[in-house]
Image (cartoon, rainbow, N blue to C red):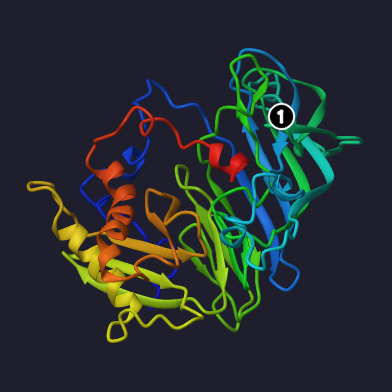
Amino acid sequence: MFLGRALALALVLGALGMPPSTVGAGPVRAAATPLPAYVIDAAFDPAARTITGTVEAHFINTSPAPIRDVALVLFPNRFAVPDSRIDDINRPFVYPRETFVAGGMTVAQVETRVAAPPPPKRAKGVPVPPAEPAWETVAAPRRDAIAGHPDTLLRITLPTPLAPGATATVRARFRTLFPERYGPFGSADGRFTAIDGWFPALPTLAADGTWDTAIPPRPAPVRGDLRAPTGFKVFVGETLGPEPPADRFSFDVPAGSPPTFFAAEDYAAHSRDVDQGIVAFAELPARRAFALWPAEAHHERVLDAVERIIKERPAGVPFTAKALLIVEAPLRLELTAQGGPHLVVVSDRLLRVHKLLREFHERELAKPSTRRSCGSRSPRASRQPTRRGWWKA
């Protein structure tokens, strides 16, 4: 059975005694810049292919300059128009029905709130309780483009500039429409995937007080509540819900982990104890018969491969008692997708191949683990994960 919320604690080779904060963190920094924090209250409607709700983004002006506006990334609008790079060759691997079905994100009722300054002191040194800051409605947010994709950035002018070190909150109602699309963001045959980007989020705040969309932001903490049909199994980060008869569950994605979203009615749960650790596997059962290995169940092939990867790790590398979550998603142009320190995302086609191709698939399965656990990083791998694939997906 699934182990519920916060199940996965390491990647296949990520459970090697490394603290989670160091896994995939890139170069060591002298001091960490405070991250934004998100609070979400939303509902998932698979029939409409939507997530609708509110998001509050809390942030600090960490720059030495006043901030005059706030920006929100509306990533799903990347899929509002057909992709000119789709042709007759790759079309079956991008569009489930080989036709373009748009996605997008709309935002309404945008409000901002600036935290009150420190309260003045009375004569005897007793502080005056600060007044609760009021929400101010934004009249006309401006839309902009990221990487040439229209309406993927929303700019919100603040009533007054936000001073260095001051905090503010942006609250907005949003509606995300999943495109019918294979890959790291979309829906395919009633199965939903979002590696990130399913709610409006802040870009990176640059040193000059502007918002830099070229530098990917570090994964910030995200918590909240999600309503979903009881017949669906939904993962937000590493939290699984809802638990029938409830149709609502809470999630809490820590800083450093992407707020992934996976949902399907037919996720099947499997697990195995491996080297004093737990490997859990969320399988998307094949909807077409695969007769290449008729005598071996697919989940056994995957768990066998993971066990070999763990047991064949370099000599002297410890494997502490942790847990691992592997989630299948409808990927077609790739075998794996960006996961997190505690999550591996693989294609539902992984290892559903002839034995002659098995070694290649196993190498692809091992790659995300090796990069995070063994410290052997290329210059590219040592940087923060980029969103280049998002805008060119």
Q: Residue at x 71, y 29 (%)?
A: 128
Q: Residue at x 65, y 21 (%)?
A: 124
Residue 182 image-quadrant placement: bottom right
Q: Nearer the viewer, residue 187 or 228?
A: 187
Placement of 109 over or under 208, stated as above or below: below
Placement of 132 over or under 163, stated as above or below: below
Residue 49 image-quadrant placement: bottom right
Q: Secondary structure at mark 1?
A: loop
What is the three-letter code of the residue carrying label 1?
Val
**Residue 214, percent across and down?**
59, 27
* Mark 1 crowd level (few <14, some 14–19, many ≥20, 10 Å Cα): few
* Residue 147 left/right relative to 139: left
Q: Nearer the viewer, residue 91 or 64?
A: 91
Placement of 263 over or under 121, stated as above or below: below
The N terminus is located in which quarter?
bottom left
Q: Residue at x 63, y 56 (%)?
A: 88
| Residue 130 seen anywhere in this rendered image of the structure | no
**Residue 54, percent across and down?**
74, 53
In the rendered image, the residue lying farthest to the bottom is 295
Residue 47 image-quadrant placement: bottom right
| Residue 166 seen anywhere in this rendered image of the structure | yes
In the rendered image, the residue lying farthest to the front is 88
* Residue 76 left/right relative to 348: right
| Residue at mark 1 | 128
Q: Nearer the viewer, residue 261 or 358?
A: 358
